Amino acid sequence: GQDTVKEQAFTFIPPPPSITQVTPGEGPDSGGTTVDVFGDNMDFVEVVTLGSQELVGPIEIISPTQIRFVTEAHDPGQSTLTLTDRFGQAAFFPAAFYFAAPPLIDSLTPLAGTNKGGTPVVITGSGFRSDQNVYFGTVMTAPPTVVGQTQMFVISPTHPNGDVVIKVVDTWAR
């Protein structure tokens, strides 16, 4: 008998990447958050996608079980993470990263209170979270009580007489 040989007829490739953990799981919608992704078979990952947005910046392959990248500006909300390797194999991690919108104040009630503090104030707006701080001028209030993402309650602090700016500041100092 005669043997038949076909050169380069079959290619072995590594298993697809897999994702077990994404940390942190949230950051500002303006981008700039360094994200570590843990799993397996990550040494050939070439494309990172959050939601429908492909990452333009560099992907750092730390090891076969870890990659790192920095988020870019993104629409607010939850995003699925997709890692695609050079062989076209992909791993998906639903709800992997939450892009938080900055807090915005629309109104507050009442518009005045005693300089001794203690006035309950309702702040209405968007992007509110329990880890945010509220300032009357430069004086921070006690932690707010947040109802959904559109309303929070605070108690006015002691403050000298006069008008002040009210600020809601998130974890990322926005």
Image (spheres, helix red, strand yellow):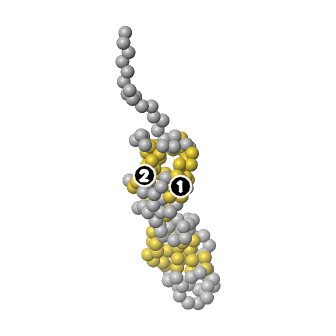
Which residue is situated farthest in the top direction here?
1
Q: Position of residue 33 (x, y in %)?
A: 52, 60
13 sits to left or right of 62: left
Which residue is situated farthest in the bottom direction here?
161
> On the image, numbered disc 2 is attached to which residue?
49
Q: Nearer the viewer, residue 170 or 88?
A: 88
Residue 142 appears in the figure: yes
Amino acid carrying label 2: it is: Thr
**Circle 2 residues within 10 Å: few <14, some 14–19, many ≥20:** some
Amino acid carrying label 1: it is: Val
Q: Is residue 4 above or below residue 11?
A: above
Q: Position of residue 37 (x, y in %)?
A: 53, 49
Element type where label 1 sits in the image: strand
**Circle 1 residues within 10 Å: few <14, some 14–19, many ≥20:** some
Element type where label 2 sits in the image: strand
Q: Give the CA distance from mark 2 to mark 1.
A: 13 Å
Q: Position of residue 69 (x, y in %)?
A: 51, 55
Name the residue located 59 percent from the left edge and 86 percent from the top edge.
114
Name the residue located 55 percent from the left edge and 90 percent from the top edge.
162
Q: Is residue 136 above or below residue 10?
A: below
> On the image, numbered disc 1 is attached to which residue?
35
Quadrant the N terminus occupies: top left
Residue 98 appears in the figure: no
Name the residue located 47 percent from the left edge and 63 percent from the top edge.
31
What is the count of numbered marks?
2
Q: Nearer the viewer, residue 3 or 62?
A: 3
Q: Position of residue 34 (x, y in %)?
A: 54, 58
